[in-house]
Amino acid sequence: MKHNKTLDHFQARIFTGNRTAGEPETDFSGNGQQWQDYRTIKLPGFDGSQTLNLDDFWLEVFTHQSREVTAQLTGLETISKYSNTQQLKEPFTIVASLTYTREDE
């Protein structure tokens, strides 16, 4: 008999740097396919907003199907000053709790 697991519920918190406790920068939660609404996250930045791409995080979630996942993210922000453009990078950590439903075949 083969067991397939489907994502049922997720709850995640995003922290600056390597922190995994305290007040998060942002948090989100959802059920099932709502994970697709959280493939990118925008946070306030130095000169606008930072973008965090969560595709690698979700790949790990679906590959390993762990109940707890902690992963490193990189926030990217493009700033322009005096016609010079720079890409700023800031480290973040995501801590997620996940539940799954099991389907037997």
Image (cartoon, rainbow, N blue to C red):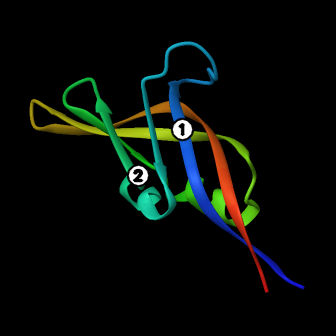
Query: What residue is drawn where x is 51% and y is 61%?
Result: 32
Provide the secondary structure element on which disc 2 rests: helix
In the picture shown, does residue 72 fall above or below 31? above
In the image, 18 versus 61, the foreground residue is 61
Which tag, 2 or 1, sits closer to the chain's start? 1
Q: Position of residue 16 (x, y in %)?
A: 50, 23
Q: Quadrant of residue 19?
A: top right
Which residue is depicted at the point 56% across and 23% down?
Answer: 17
x and y percentages locating residue 92 in the rendered image? 52, 31
- The foreground one among 25 and 97 is 97
The quarter of the picture where residue 34 lies is: bottom left
Q: In this orientation, which residue lies closer to the viewer: 57 or 81? A: 57
Q: Residue at x 38, y 51 (%)?
A: 40
- In the picture, the quarter occupied by the N terminus is bottom right
Q: Is residue 77 left or right of residue 102?
A: left
What is the three-letter code of the residue carrying label 1?
Ala
Q: SS for tag 1?
A: strand
The residue where tag 1 is placed is 12
For disc 2, the marked residue is 38
| Residue 21 horizontal side relative to residue 66, left or right | left
Residue lying at the far left in this picture: please name it.
82
